[in-house]
Amino acid sequence: MNSKTIASVICALAVSIGVQAQVNAADSVFNSSRASRLSVGGYGEVAYSRNFYSDHVSRYSQPEEHKDDPSHGRFDLPHVVVYLGYDFGKGWSLGSEIEFEHGGAGLAYEKEDEEGGEWEQEVEKGGEVELEQFWLQKTFSRAANLRFGHIVVPVGLNNAHHEPLNFFTVYRPEGENTILPSTWHQTGLSFFGRSGKFRYEAQLLAALNADNFTNTGWIHKGHKSPMEYDVANKYGAAARNLDDKQVQRGKVLFTEMGCAQCHRPSWKTGEDKMWVDASTKAYADANGLAKNGNYYDLLPRYPYQTIWPYTDMVQHRLFMKNDIRTGWCRTTPLWGRGLSRRLTGADDRLHDCRARTVVEAIMWHGYSKESDAYNSTVKFYNLSKEDRDAVVKFIEAI
């Protein structure tokens, strides 16, 4: 890849300059009372507003269609929060934060003409009640603190300082609030402290779920879990360093050996026009979903995107021993293969998983002198150990 890849996050590092008017949200639990061991506090906000822009769910993905949508008024209770904390002494403390969003959870009600279900409509209130913080903390000094439990993730200013006095708009800034989890809170471990005017924090968390990433909300829903707990069987990692000198050396060697002839680095997608069957067309016509007979935009499209799979998607002759495909193998994409060991605990390679490491996978390419990759394999074999390690590190960084 030519650019850095953003992988799932387990380590969030934030450094901020301390400003008297801006308090980190995670510290607010104990800011309400210092006179006793028990701390009780909180805040609430009531908003009366009129938004002179569209509130449609597609206002970002299809802005031209919603730029002239009418304005709308809104009466809202965005957030009502209760803080509870307790200081046990000797550096041990407990903190919690319970938040009621938009008035809290409400009951659904249903309108129907008859019980048989000829016509019915169900409406649900969209508020939430969430436990945003619940942690046990050990303070060693101003510079060193450990926090265990459910904690706020300080990625972006909006998460670190999400209380209403810390931003100028009525609602939280829509930029960060749209593309990042907000408020981002997860169960994990945190190490933080202060040095002079700087506050720093490193956290260990369950990885984001890439299945919940979207083209309009980026990673906004990535921390959501379908379970009552955060799935943490597989851990993500910080973005791999593609600018590392050893990785860059391996990339050059990868091309010089001829590997990139089959493991073609990049592709550009086409128009991305999906095939539409007759039943889908009929449904779209009946519900007015296809404007001017355009069925291709029923789903989001991603035309003319540059991707980096490192494959030509073509079958080549490798003639490996005991190969049930009579010597022919389609070039396996290399992107993401470097995360296999971290995510699954295994590092199996090739189309039939016969290779246990990157080096084994490369050497299997040269099992037969008739192999299309024989010359490239010999070149790899004759490299110095330092250069071979660089090639492996590059492949694991793709």
Image (cartoon, helix red, strand yellow):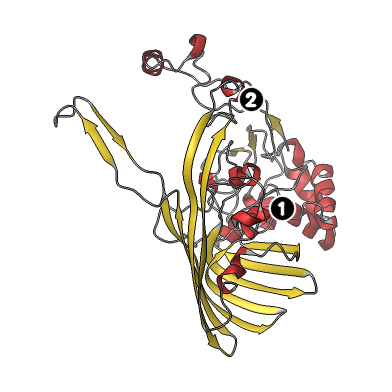
**Residue plotted at (51% across, 65% down):** 42
Q: Is residue 75 above or below residue 187?
A: above
Depth check, mark 2 against mark 1: the one in front is: 2
Mark 1 surroundings: few (<14), some (14-19) or many (≥20) residues within 10 A = many
How far from the left and from the top, in percent, is residue 290? Answer: 47, 15
Nearest the eye: 229 or 242: 229
Image marks 2 and 1: residues in contact by CB distance under 8 Å: no
**Residue plotted at (52% across, 21% down):** 274
**Residue plotted at (47% across, 41% down):** 75
Q: CA distance from mark 2 to mark 1?
A: 26 Å
Instruction: Report the amino acid beneath label 2.
Output: Pro
Q: Which mark sits nearer the N-terminus, 2 or 1?
A: 2
Q: At numbered mark 1, what does the secondary structure look like: helix, strand or loop? A: helix
The answer to whether 304 appears left or right of 299 in the picture is: right
Name the residue tied to disc 2: 303
Nearest the eye: 335 or 160: 160
Q: Which disc, if any, is residue 397? A: 1
How far from the left and from the top, in percent, is residue 108? Answer: 29, 43
How far from the left and from the top, in percent, is residue 375? Answer: 78, 44
How far from the left and from the top, in percent, is residue 72? Answer: 51, 30
Q: Is residue 106 above or below residue 111?
A: below
- Look at the image and tell me whether residue 36 can be seen: yes
**Residue plotted at (58% across, 20% down):** 68
| Quadrant for the N terminus in the image | top right
Instruction: Report the amino acid beneath label 1.
Output: Ala
Furthest toward the top, the residue is 292
